[in-house]
Amino acid sequence: MNTPSVSLSEVTLLFYPEDKPYQLQSLVLKDQVKTQQGRVMISAKYKQGKIIVAVIEGHAELLNLLGDRFDGRPASAA
């Protein structure tokens, strides 16, 4: 019997919480199963309550997100 090969991978999820769909967040997951085809299998407990927009290989540190610097004041013309 031929069983498919899998490996473990560290990934970063980019997601919107379902209760705050305007606030992009990230979560690093270690030891996630990655199939031979390159697909990472995220368990249901990490998917629950999230709208996942990207799965990034490795530990990605988010420095800026859309809206992080928004303070409601118009930008200076100078």
Image (tube, rainbow, N blue to C red):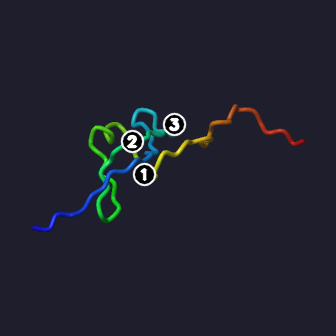
Q: Nearer the viewer, mark 1 or mark 3?
A: 1
Mark closest to the chain's N terminus, 1 or 3? 3
Q: Which of marks 3 and 2 is in front?
A: 2
- List x then y, in percent, for residue 16: 45, 40
**Res 29 label:** 2
The N terminus is located in which quarter? bottom left
Q: Mark 1 points at which residue?
A: 55
Depth check: give the residue in front, 68 or 74.
68
- List x then y, in percent, for residue 74: 77, 37
Q: In which quarter of the image is residue 78?
A: top right
Q: In which quarter of the image is residue 28?
A: top left
- Amino acid at dot 2: Leu
- List x then y, in percent, for residue 2: 14, 68
Mark closest to the chain's N terminus, 3 or 2? 3
Taking the spot 41% from the left edge, 32% from the top edge, the residue there is 19
Label 2 with label 1: CB-CB less than 8 Å:
no
